[in-house]
Amino acid sequence: MSAGSLFQLSRRTLLSAGAAGAMLSPMRVLAQQSGAAARLAALLERSARADDLLSPLDTTRRDGKPLGDAFVDPLGDAFGRTLEENKRAELAELRTIDRAALSPTDRIAYDVFAYKTAQTLELFDADGAEPTLFEVQQMAPLNPSFGLQVEFPDYMSGGAAPFATVTDYERGLAQLEGFADWLEQTVARLKRGRAAGYVQPRIIVTNILSQVEAMLALPQDASPFYAPIRTMPETLPAEERARLAGAYRTAIRDRVYPGYDLWRTYLTADYLPAATEEPGRWAMKDGRRLYDWELSFHTTTDMSADEIHALGQSEVARILARMEEVKSTVGFDGDLSAFFDHVRTDPKFYYTEPQQLLERFASIEAEIWKSIPKLFHDRPSAPFRVAPLPALGDQRGTGYYRPGPPDGTTPGTLYFNMSMLDTRPIPTLETLTLHEGIPGHHFQITKAIENEDLPPILRFGRATAYTEGWGLYAESLGPELGMFTDPMQLFGHLDMEMLRAVRLVVDTGLHAKGWSRQQAIDFMLANTSMAERDVIVEIDRYISYPGQACAYKIGELTLQRLKAEAAEALGPRYDVRDYHAQVLDTGVLPMAVLEQKIETWLSEG
């Protein structure tokens, strides 16, 4: 059963059970709610603890706590077995809980848990002689955008995991050993995949090799793996500091760097010559089957690649027409392609110093906060900041947002790429602040984290279409928040919206329609003002992270549609602040669950 069909089943159950529940006495309803709610809460708590054990690095980043004792290989056989066993048992237990006896918020948690659990189990569905999708992922493990060869050094560098005690350092040492094992196991998986006909694209391999070469070029004492030693507290005993420093040097010298060198040797000599020139999933064995799951996972819809591709083409045409209007407003003499070149090359659209960027971000944020009460009933309490992107993140494009821990000790942060300032156009800064900060990712994610009444699956959950859809939707609120008063800032907004529309076209083009990498690059250059360097980074991310880029527009368009439906249904009683509360106050939801929630709200309104 697919995640979508499971949700439809639970939705029908809700509708029928609601009528039955209405005939029960109030005391009996309360008793049933109490029992069902307690069982659901216990199940969700056990599941969250089990998931934390399987994702210790994510847990460290989320909670700001020290690293755990054991490194977990997310593509290991033991990981896969445990994950499948956990989810099958959890889904079976969930089905014994009376959904109709739950409160509205608990019903939402029930539906989200059912949806996500079923979606995860699709990775392990066996179909005759075909490998499971989890096995396909094992045999095609390289990811230059979000692979552990990028993520783990960030954890060790102090970007996520605190190092304060001897125990923290001992755990970090154990993590280093586990990471070295992962480096070796990944090569073994690549060999198995190649022998079975699963070979990844050449561009993924060359990008991985660039990362490997950059790491090996660093002196070992200057590597991110040694960062905890460089910042070791003076409060630790001198003999312990010396012992730990020696142990870290040994692990890095004898295990970690040789692991990276193993990657370099194998990828260069054996894997790269066999890698495919075609960049998309369609060219890999079982790749299209995997891509269909990836689209469903990230968009939380049943839209096909063809439907998404056509939607993207339609959105590109619509936004191009609006760009033409802005071009006319500013009096530019030339076609849109020339206008794109003008924005790319005119120095007036770019700062020359990082501090100028930081000051502009701060002034934009202050202006947005003034109008927030018009659109939202309340606001999160945790602060927001912009900081330079860590050096190891320079290949990730413009930047990324990372929330602070639940205790509020660290602000939510937009890590922005301050290098190559001639590719960071000023006209996009208002839109970036809306998307990444207020009222976008920081606002949405922090509101959920700060709501301690929510179960963990809603408070800390992930659903790309919801999270990124909200970020893109937040951009559209710019005019109501005092933004885009200058036509070039409006153009920057349209240019960034166009990026998300183009993603629908190029992601599906690359992975389902046989597009070449250059074809995707050319399409993006023709329809946005992005610099070619940034376009290449974007396209390479879509190649290595299929489906994810489609979630932004799918989520945003769903939110816009639901907003219009709410305004029409409620008429004079409609208040956009109420709509935003409905979207935000129950945390992160798959779009199918959010649609059901809004439908229920309107039917009761």
Image: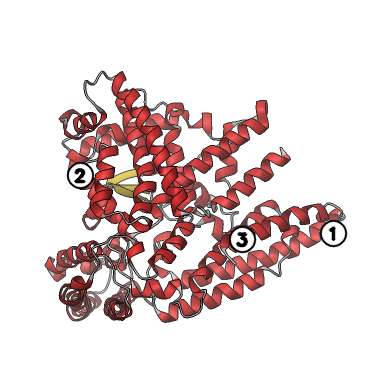
Query: What is the spatial separation of the Cα atoms under label 3 and label 2, in whole angstroms?
Result: 42 Å
Name the spot of residue 63 as percent of width and height, x first.
Answer: 44, 61
Instruction: Give residue 532's mark.
Output: 2
Q: Which residue appears at 60% of the width and 65% of the height?
A: 44
- Circle 2 packing at 10 Å, graded few (<14), some (14-19), many (20+), is some
- Relative depth, front residue between 602 and 290: 290
N-terminal of the two: label 2 or label 1? Answer: 1
- Relative depth, front residue between 32 and 229: 32
Point out the image quarter for the N terminus: bottom right
Look at label 3 and name its amino acid: Ser
Look at label 1 and name its amino acid: Arg
In this rendering, the label closer to the viewer, 2 or 1: 2
Q: Where on the picture, by quarter, is residue 574? A: top right
Where 240 falls versus 428 (above or below)? below
Instruction: Give residue 465's mark.
Output: none
Does residue 229 show up?
no
Does residue 237 show up?
yes
213 relative to 41 in the view: left or right: left
**Dot 3 corresponds to which residue?**
5
